[in-house]
Structure formats: C-alpha cells, structure tokens
Amino acid sequence: MSTAQTPLIDMDNISIAFGGIRAVDGASVNLYPGEVVALLGHNGAGKSTLIKILSGAYKRDSGTIKVNGEEASIGNPRDAKAYGIETIYQTLALADNVDTAANLYLGRELMTPWGTLDDVAMEHSAREVMGRLNPRFQRFKDPVKALSGGQRQSVAIARAILFNARILIMDEPTAALGPQETAQVGELIKQLKSEGIGIFLISHDIHDVFHLADRVAVMKNGQVVGTAKVGDVTEDEVLGMIILGKCPPGAIPGPGAVN
Amino acid sequence: MSDPAVSIDRARASELGLTARFFKATELDTRLLGMIGALVVIWIAFQVLSGGQFLTPRNLWNLSVQTSSVAVMATGMVLIIVTRNIDLSVGSLLGFIGMIMGVMQTEMLPKLIGFEHPATWIITLGIGIVAGAVIGGFQGFIIAFLGVPAFIVTLGGLLVWRGAAWWVTSGRTVAPMDSTFRLMGGGPEGSIGSMWSWILGIAACVAIVIMVANSRRQRQRFNFPRRPVWAEVFMAAISCGLVLGAVSIANAYYWPIGIVRKYADANNITIPDGGLFISHGIAIPVLIAVATGIIMTFVTTRTRFGRYVFAMGGNPEAADLAGINTRWVTMKIFIIMGILCAIAGAISTARLNAATNAQGTLDELLTIAAAVIGGTSLAGGVGTIAGAMIGALLMQSLSSGMVLLGLDTPLQNIVVGIVLVIAVWLDTIYRRRTA
C-alpha cells in the first residue's frame, strides 16, 4: 500500500461526547482503496461510535472527514450513502416486518414510470443479488423477521453491496454467524477487496478479523492506541494493544498509547 | 436424477393438507378471513336473536351508512398505529371541523355567494379539508419535530378541539345543512340509485379482473413463481361476487313509501297499483368510504411513503439509518389523519343535517378499536386498511344489532368493551402461533 496514494477515507482528529463522556476522543484513521482495516477494541472502546460518525448516524463534535482527499460533510445517513459509504450495522438495522426486497431498497426504492413502487423489479434484483450471496435463499415473500440469523445477515450485506459501494463498513459482521457462514463472509470480503472497495471491519474479537485485514487500528477509551500492518505485529501484540493499550515496536502509536 | 431442490419442494407440498395447500395457492390472509368469519357469526347471531330483522336490505344498508364515518378515520388510524403512535383527538377534530363546515355553509357562504349556491358544498368541504390538514400537521409537527409523545399531544388535542368546537358558536347547534352537502350523508337522495350502482359494481369487477391479470403479467415478466390459475380465477370470482352481492342488496332497499309519494307528486308520476319501487342503491357516504379505502390501500402498498410508514413501524432506527426522513413522514401521517377527520366530519354532519359541538364524541375510541380489531398491532409495523374498515363494520354491527335487540346503552358499552379485549387477546394468540 503506497502512502502516496490518496486515501479513500481520511478521518482526522474526530471527537464526540455524550453528556460528558468522551466516546471518541481525537481519533484518526484512514482507509485506502482495496484495503481492509480492522478496527479493534473492547466493548465501549468507541469503535462503533467512530464508525457511526462516518456512516452519518451520529454527528461529530469536531474533526474532519475526507473522502478521496476532499473534505466531506456528512450530517445524516443519506449524505454518507451519497459518498458511496455503506454500512452493515451490528444490529443489521433491518425493518423486520417487511420482506427482503423492501429491505434491500429501503430509502432507495425502484419506481415505475407512474411513480409507484416497482416491487417486481425490486424482487428481481433481490433474487439476483441474494443468489450470488446465498444461493439457497428462497424466502423472498416472508418478512425478514422469519429468517434465520445467517439469512438476515446476508440480507444486510446484500443491501450494502447492491448500490456499488466504494467504502464498506462492517460492524461485527460475523458475531451472529456459524462457522460456514463466517467463511462465506470472509470470501465475500476478499472478493469486494479485489474490486477496489475499501472495508472497515469492526470487531472486539481479534481472531475473527486478523487473517482478513491488511491493517489493524486499535482503540481504547475513545482514543487510538496505534495502527499497524498485519505483517508487522503478532496477534499477541495486538491483544496487548487492545487490553493494555501498549503499543508494540511494529506499530505506529496513536494518542491513546501507554508508555 | 431429478433436481434435488425441486424434489424437496414437491415433498414439502405433498406434506401439506388440502386446506393448507388451498391457502398457500390463494395466498389468502388467514387473519382477515378470521375477521370476516367473526363478522358472519355476529350477523347470523343477531339475525336469529332479532327474529330475522338484522339481515334485511334496509338494516344492512343503514349499517353501511353508519359505518362510513368511522371507517374513513380508521384508514388513517392504521398508519398512525403502525408507526407506534396514537391519535386520541380524531373525535374532537371531527366535531371541530364539522362545526367549521356547518358555520361556513349556513352563515358565511350564504352572505358571500348566496343561499343554496351549487358551489357551497365543495367550498365548505375544501375549507374543512384544509383545516383538517393544518390541524393534523400542527399536531404532527409537535410530535415529530418537538418530540412530545403522540399520546400526550393528541390527548391535549382531544380537549382543545372539543373546546374549540363549542367556542365556534358558543355551543349552539348549526342547522340545516346545504342540500347538496347533505347528499354526503346518505338517505334516499344521497344514494346513487339502481342503475349507477350496477354500473359501478360492474366497473369494479372489470377493475378486479384487470388487476389480477396485470399482477400476473408483472410476475411473468421476470419469470417469478405464480399462483395457480385456478386460484387466481377463484379469488377474482369471489371478489366480483362480493361486489355484485353488495350492489344487489343496496338495490333491494327501496325508498320509504312517504318519500316515494312526495317524489311522484313532484314529478307528476302516478303510482301504479302494485306500488312504485325506487331502489336506494349504494349510499354516497359508503362510496366515499370505499374510495378512501382504495386510495389509502394504494398509498400504503404502492407508494414510497407507505413503504416508509411500515418500515418505521417495524424498526424506527433502521428506517433512520436507511436515510428515511422519519420526522417528515410522521408529520405527513398526521396531516392525512386530519384530512380524513374532515371527510368523516362532512359525512356525519351531512347525515345528521346539523353540526353540534358534541359530534364525534368517543369516536376516537371507536376508530382505534376498529383499527385494532382489524389487525393493526399496537406494537407497530403491522396493519391493513381493509382490516381496519372491516373492524369498523364489525364494531358498528355490534352496536346496531344491540339497538335492534333493544339493549340499553350502558349494556351496549359493556359488550363493546368486552369484545374489544377479547378480539385483541385472540389476535395475540394468533400472532404467537404464526410467528
């Protein structure tokens, strides 16, 4: 990864506080095209919050976000999507009572020339994209509430990749999945990466993501402990960063590193 | 070797019993069917208890007219409850807007454009609808943008608009209404007669067939699984049968003899020996309610707005994260509710031929009950317009039947209250078993 290249995403010195608690405190991370960056940290380390600022769910108190080197104003989820930033939330954020196609196109429905919902066309592309992700998926008429955890996950992923995302944020993408489905998600990440999409993987479990990521960024108490290329550090060293906030020699220390 | 997926599917199909296969093929909503079943049971029970007075064209026709006003409001209440809100102000709003419309046509407009001007009704209705939209939008704004719970805002509205209805005329009843406006309330004049009823009924059947064919063609376009042909034909036939049955019942209710005599005198017709039979046909308020139901069904199922309403009800956070402007959608829902209150207000003032400050008292509870009995879940995300309208019909059938049996009002309230609780309890069981 040449540093001369413009980063796809450059979040600089981001802070947000909720009622006196500084959930994210001067955090900086970046992401290059075709790169997978794992954002690691304990529960409550601020990784999900940081990423929700990028996806438009929260408004930052300070800091800048650059997309392709240009400053971006992201005030709500629609703005983020306009920049090609798609998010798969830990909760999946699916409307449980409507069917797969409706969820895939939620907020971006296909319309007929008469201005009505084109359900058939939506179901058609839903079948197409779900066929790629999960060929055995057949329950297009059921509300997503009726689907299994893995099926729901594939609906959430399908929604993110349906609209030619350039930046994909995956918050704990495999937490609810079995081994086989986890492997599927891994394959998918490799495929998307080869298409030049930048991916943020958020996880509190290092083993889930270590082999998938190019770089890791570790957060603790709202601050970045350090970032490192996966080849330069061992899993144990990263674990030390997560638990103790201790930055190993192979990593670039951040403001949260303990000396 | 056959394709394993196909053989699995076939194995599954043969596991299902005959009835299960029937429901799968027709995609009938078993819940809606259950409600219609309950309605039929209630009707038959009243028919037996009243000694055959309930299922007469006259009673059914009156029932349809009495249901209209609440049915119109129930269609809007569905959207409100689906998004996990509530509107307690609809009865008061109906009273207030009814009063505005009453004053408009009896006191304001006669001075401006003359008494019984042909445009009086439409101007009056237009002002009522604008007032409804503004008031609904105001309440919606407070709920969506200022974050005050809908329960509190509309509870306040319940008091405010009832007070306002009184305040418009200091409690005086306003009557009589404009004669064209009055047609919205039904009666022999406010019905479209036998010929037009048949024309409309047949047009509706044609529309049903076209819709079934069209949806089939749409699914064919992408080669999706389709319902079996027999199921399509069966559903279309049942729907057309219901429409034509309703028309023939409305047409079997003739004008009362006194009105026929007056009509004959006025038009120089001599009444033949066997008597002159003039059919009521479908009442105009019923047409208004049905049209409202069709439009609202279209809005909820075919438009982006409707999709957002249900998505918000299912998971408000997900709707937000999907980039839906949930506040504006909420406000729009309350604007629609205000407009529907105005239409319901027009129907009920026209029917009463007067605007009183007590009009629509307790209608909010009937409307909510209709929506809930009709399968709208108070937990949000679930509900249909058709269900709510059948719910309204069910509530009205109960009270009308009890009046027919001569039950006292307090007893009627007791029965309605018990039925509401039982209906929701049954629904809870149904949902638990199907979930």
Image (tube, helix red, strand yellow):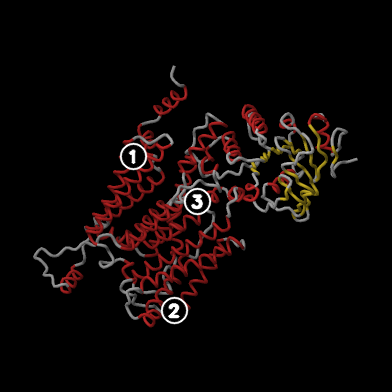
Q: Pick whichever, A147 or A156, lies toward us.
A: A156
* One can see residue A239 in this view: yes
**Label 1 secondary element:** helix
The amino acid at mark 2 is Gly
Residue A27 coordinates in the image, percent (x, y): 79, 46
Residue, far front: A4
Q: What residue type is labelled 3?
A: Arg
Q: Distance between the residues labelled 1 and 2?
A: 55 Å
Same chain for mark 3 and mark 1? The answer is yes
Q: In this view, does B202 lie above or below B128?
A: above
* Count of all numbered marks drawn on residues in the image: 3
Q: Is residue B202 above or below residue B273?
A: above
- The circle on residue B171 is 2
Q: Counting other residues with Cα less than 10 Å from the Cα at mark 2, is it few (<14), some (14-19), or many (20 or more)? A: some
Query: Front-most of B240 and B428?
Result: B240
- Give the labeled residue for mark 3: B304
Q: Do the residues labelled 2 and 3 touch (CB within 8 Å)?
A: no
Task: Provide the secondary structure element on which disc 2 rests.
Answer: loop
For marks 2 and 3, give the one nearer the viewer.
3
Please state the horizontal and vertical placement of residue A148, each as a whole percent of the image. Answer: 56, 34
Residue neighbourhood size for the residue with mark 3, other residues' Cα within 10 Å, grouped as few (<14), some (14–19), many (≥20) = many
Q: Quadrant of residue A158?
A: top right
Asked if the residue at tag 1 contacts the one at tag 3, i.e. Cβ–Cβ closer than 8 Å, the answer is no
Q: Which of marks 1 and 2 is nearer the N terminus?
A: 2
Label 1 chain ID: B
User: Disc 3 vs disc 1: which is toward the camera?
Assistant: 3
Q: Give the spatial CA distance, label 3 vs label 1.
A: 27 Å
Q: Which amino acid does label 1 sit on?
A: Glu
B396 sits left or right of B338 in the view: left
The residue that mark 1 highlights is: B232
